[in-house]
Amino acid sequence: MLVDTHAHVQVHQFGSDRPAVIAAAFADGVARMIVPGIDLETSRAALALATAYPGRIFAAIGTHPHDVKTMTPETLAAQRELANAPGVVAIGEIGLDYYRDLSPRDTQREALIAQVALARDLDLPIILHNRESHEDLVALLRAHGAGVRGVFHCFLGDQRMARDALDLGYFLSFAGPLTFPRNVVLGEVAAWAPADRILIETDSPYLAPQPFRGKRNEPRHVALVARKLAELRGLPVEEIAAITARNAAALFRLPASAPAIGQR
């Protein structure tokens, strides 16, 4: 059973064929997927998908660091209301991004602290975006994240960065870049990371794995990430699928089993 723990299938890149993309993922062995929001609109759309596919699609509610410049107290209140709905399993995608700097850094930090507090209030895990911002992100989590669990999504760091995340109690999620030939250091981390702290994802529609690199990514491609992770760890792919599905269920408190395809 494969679980894609990060797939933005609610965004406009899937506007013309979303149901077909979701159906293809289910047909190819993806039992569940988690759909994170990046702002209020996409958070509402993620919740709509969770409502349409109960037990198979789950939503996360959050404002991405790119978009926090538009975040207001009213935004946070709306996120709180959405996050209380059935089918919501996390606060995210939240975090820091010092690479694109599309929102001021102080605004990013303030928004992260506020959304971490929301996750604590609601006893939900957080889904973290971390780009060129590791030191600040870890410092903020140490200062403000006590008691909050979560995942460093699309982990791209080295072993030192991985240790920081693991020491805080977080999971590491591996995506398409794990399959890129030049990502040797990332492969070493994936081979070394504790088995009870690893997840897999696609980050659809972004970061498609080999051999689809440069094309639109889809949740069904999580199987290729699982295959590469299995290769790196010297395990059968079925075992990696089982391990990462079990970890996803533990972190996001998913139901014990997913309904059969076609059931609602």
Image (cartoon, grey):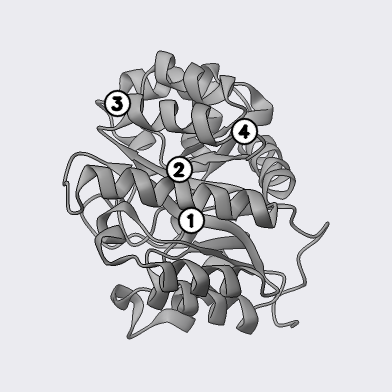
**Residue that mark 1 sits on:** 92
Left or right of residue 164: residue 88: right
Earlier sequence position, callout 2 versus callout 4: 4
Q: Label 1 to label 2, Cα distance in Å?
A: 10 Å
Earlier sequence position, callout 3 versus callout 1: 1
Earlier sequence position, callout 2 versus callout 3: 2
Asked whether disc 1 touches disc 2, contact meaning CB atoms under 8 Å apart, the reply is yes
SS type, badge 1 = strand
Residue 186 in which image quadrant: top left
Q: Label 4 to label 3, Cα distance in Å?
A: 32 Å
SS type, badge 3 = loop
Rendered position, 173 above or below 160: below
Residue drawn at x 48%, y 60% is: 220
Rendered position, 118 above or below 245: below
Asked whether disc 2 touches disc 3, contact meaning CB atoms under 8 Å apart, the reply is no
Rendered position, 118 above or below 168: below
- Quarter occupied by the C terminus: bottom right
Q: Label 2 to label 3, Cα distance in Å?
A: 16 Å
Left or right of residue 78: residue 124: right
**Residue that mark 4 sits on:** 146
**Residue that mark 3 sits on:** 183
Residue drawn at x 43%, y 73% is: 74
Exactly how many numbered labels are in the figure? Answer: 4
Judge depth for marks 1 and 2 and give the one in front: 1
Three-letter amino acid code at the position of disc 2: His
Earlier sequence position, callout 4 versus callout 3: 4
Looking at the picture, tell me which residue is in the foreground, 45 or 115: 115
